[in-house]
Amino acid sequence: MAHTYATDVLVAGAGPVGLTAAGELRRRGVSCRIVDRLPARLPFAKAVGIQPRTLEVWDRMGMVRAALEAAVPMRGQFLYINGAEQARTELSVPPEVPYGFAALPQYETERVLDEFLGRFGTAVERGTELVSFRQDPDGVTCRLHTPSGEEEVRTRFLVGCDGAHSIVRKGLGLSFEGGAFAEEYMLADVRVDWDLPPGYAVRSMHRNGDGAVDDVLVCIPLPGHGRYRMSMMVPPELSTAPQADAAGDGITHGLQSGRSPGLADIQAVVDRLSPQPTTASDIRWTSVFRISHRIVDRYGDGRVFVAGDAAHIHPPTGAQGMNTGIQDAWNLAWKIALAVGDGTAHPRMLASYDAERRPVGEEVVGRTVRHAVEGMENDPDDPATLMMREAQLLVGYRGSPIVDPPGDGPGPRPGDRAPDCSGLTRPVAAYPMRLYDVLREREHVLLLYGAGPVTGSGLDALVRTARDLSGGRMEVCVLLPAGAGADTGFEADGTPLPVYRDSRGEFARLYAAEEPTAFVIRPDGYLGARLSPPAPQPLATHLAAVFPTN
C-alpha cells in the first residue's frame, strides 16, 4: 500500500544537535523539516568547547572551514588553588589528528550550522512546536503548533533533539534516570583586562580549612580580545527555586528564570578568585543554571529517536555534552538516510544507533559526574589517554551489530575510529594529501591497501562484491605502499580506480598494515571491517549485515 509523507524526517529542536541532524540529512538528499518553538536563536554562550572529533565530523560534512574561521583555539588550562598556580595543562593531540581543541560560543555554532543547512534550501521553522505524535509501522503522524495554528504532518521518521524536557522522549515513554546537583551556578559572558596568555581556560578554586572546595571560578576563552564565558557559584541572594513545575517533569537542568546576576555579582567573584587583579566589563548576558545527570533507557523506538540533551544530560565538565549530542545526530542521520533512500539499509542499521551511542552516553554521564565531584586532575587515566578521551577520539563501536568482530592484532580494528594520516600522493597532484581529504564527501569506502593479490580478477571480484551488495553506495580506492610499483593498471570492469600512494609510510604505521588489507570505512569515519587478505566472501559477509540481501 502506498503512503504519502509530507517529509521524510521531522527534526524537533534546532539547537546544535538538531541542526546537525537536519544538515546531514539534507546533504544526503533526504527531505527534512526542522522546527523549534523559539522565535529566534538565543544569544547565549552556553556550550563553548568544540572537541577535535566534532571538527572531524564537520570536515566530513563539508562545513569545517566556517567553524574554524569563527572559533578560537583552546590551548590549555591554568589551575589555581587559594590564589597559587598549581598546574598548567596543555591541550594537545597526536600529530596525525587534523584538528585541535577550539572554543566557539553556542550561538555561533548554531549560526554556522544554520547557514550550512540553508545551502540545501532548508530553514528552521521558528515559533513551531511539536506537541504530540503517534507512530505506526509505516510512519509517524506529528501534531505541530505553528504561528498560524495547528498542523498535522505525516513523516517517515521523527528525531527528538528537543532538550532536557523533550516532548519526544516523554511521548515514547522512555525512562530518564539520574539525579541532580544541589549547587547552582552563574554564567556570564564578559570581558576582562588581565594579561594571562590567550587561549587558556582558567579554573580558580578556594579550599577551606578542611580541604573542601567552597568557591570556584571557571573561565573559558571566547572569540574577542579578553572575552570569557565565566561560571561560578551562586550567592544565596540569587538562588532560584528549581523549575520542575515549568515542564512538569521534575527535571531541573540548564538556564533558570528569575533575577539574572549583574556585573557587580560577577565582579565580586572575580575579586575573590581571579589569579590577578582585573575588572570585568562589557557584559553580554548572565544567567543562573542548575545541573542534572540523567540518561534514557533506550535511544529510540520504532521510527522515533532521541539525541543530545533529550537522551542524556550531565555536568558541563570537559565540554562533553554538546559534542556528544552532535555525534549522536550524525550517527543517526547517515543511517536514516540509507533507510529512506531506496531501502538499501539492513533493518539492524537503525537498531545500531542505540547499540553504538547509548554506551557512549552512559560513559560520558558517569565520567563528567565523577570529574565534577572529584576534579579532572584526579582522573586515574594517564594524561595522554585522558586527553584523547576528552577530545572524544577514543569513542568506538566494537560489538556493534553492523561492524565485524574486532579480532586480534595491532592497529585500528572494526568498530574503531579510522585515524587520519598525511603523505598520500597522486601523480598529478603537486602536494601530499591527508586520508580525510580522500574520504571527504564520500559515503562507504572500500580502501584496498597494498598490491600483491589485489589485482586482475581478484580486484574485479572485490569491486563487484562491494558495488553489488551495497546497492552501488560503496566507492573503492587503492592505496599503495611507498615502495610499490606503478600507480597504473588498477581497474574494475574496465573502469580505472583512484589510486593513492602512502609516500611517507604513515598509513602503514598507524594502521599496522604490513600486507594487503581491505578496510571498510563507514560514512562516519569508523572501520566496519578489516579484511586481510582481501577476499570477496568475507566482504560479502560484512555487507550482508549492513545492506539488505535481495
Image (spheres, rainbow, N blue to C red):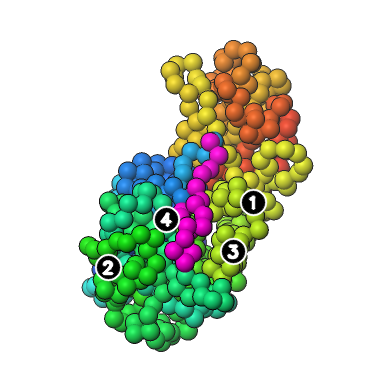
**Residue under label 1:** 382
Mark 3 residue element: helix
Which residue is at the far top?
Answer: 486
- Return the residue at label 4: 201
The image quadrant of residue 46 is bottom left
* 347 falls in the magenta region: no
Separation of residues labelled 3 and 1 (CA atoms): 15 Å
Is 10 or 380 nearer to us in this picture?
A: 380
Q: Are marks 3 and 1 in contact (CB under 8 Å)?
A: no
Q: Secondary structure at mark 4?
A: strand
- Which residue type does callout 2 highlight? Trp
User: Marks 4/2: CA distance?
Assistant: 19 Å
Q: Secondary structure at mark 2?
A: strand
In whole angstroms, how far apart are the C-alphas of marks 2 and 3?
Answer: 29 Å
Q: Earlier in the sequence, mark 3 or mark 1?
A: 3
Give the residue displayed 43% in from the left and 42% down from the top.
59
Amino acid at the residue labelled 1: Asp
Between discs 4 and 2, the one toward the N terminus? 4
21 and 415: which one is in front?
A: 415
The residue labelled by disc 3 is: 367
Image location (x, y in percent) of residue 547: 61, 47
Kindly identify which numbered label has been placed on residue 285. 2
